[in-house]
Amino acid sequence: MVEPEQDSPGDSARRDEKQIEPWRAEFLAVLAETSNVSAASAAAAVPPAKAYRLRRSEPDFAREWHAALLEGYENLEMEVLYRLRFGDPKDGEVKFDNTTALRLLGLHRETVARERAARENEDLAAVRASIRAKLDQLREHVRAREAQAAIESRPETDEEAEHG
């Protein structure tokens, strides 16, 4: 007979780590705002190594991380476009390097394109799943109606006629 495995103290800690981390929302919000893991880690008061570890072990967090980076790059694109259209403020507090921003966007263009495609595929998959569920529901409804019609159209047996 095989005995059930006992949890070691580390197992429950790992299981708890898989639950939603309290720092997660802040980390992802700052990552989307800055596209900077170090800044997001500092804002969320979590070591970057822990965030990377969670990203490797939790597919949902990895998807949220990539979505936050996509949002961050979209924000950067909008900033660059704004600055190219209207210029840099001469006395601004933040020094913005358009050349570096454009280079960074160029380097990450493929990543952004892959992430956008993945997001669209997820949306498409959700739509397809919804359609399949609706079709399954309709099929069940048709089967139930057919079964009811078969029962109602069945000829009465002699025994049923005597009692009816």
Image: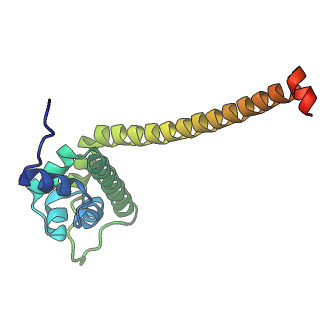
Total numbered circles: 0
Indicate the quadrant where residue 4 lies.
top left
Q: 126 above or below 96? A: above
Q: Where is residue 6 in the image (x, y as percent from the top left)?
A: 11, 46
Q: In this view, does 71 lie above or below 143?
A: below
The residue lying at 13 percent from left, 41 percent from top is 5
- In this rendering, the answer to whether 95 lies above or below 115 is below
In this rendered view, identify the residue nearer to me: 152 or 46: 152
- Regarding residue 3, the answer to whether it shows in the image is yes
Residue shown at 38% from the left, 62% from the top: 82
Q: Is residue 6 left or right of residue 153?
A: left
| Viewport quadrant of the N terminus | top left
Across and down, in percent, residue 70 comes to: 33, 50
The image position of residue 96, as x and y in percent, is 23, 64
Q: Which residue is drawn at 18% across and 52% down?
A: 15
Q: Specify the quadrant of the image occupied by residue 164.
A: top right
The residue lying toward the viewer, choosing from 17 and 58, is 17
- Is 23 in front, or is 120? 23
Q: In which quarter of the image is residue 108?
A: top left
Q: Which colour scheme is used?
A: rainbow
Q: Position of residue 38 (x, y in %)?
A: 13, 60
State the residue at coordinates (35%, 42%). 115
Q: Residue 155: tell me if it is visible.
A: no
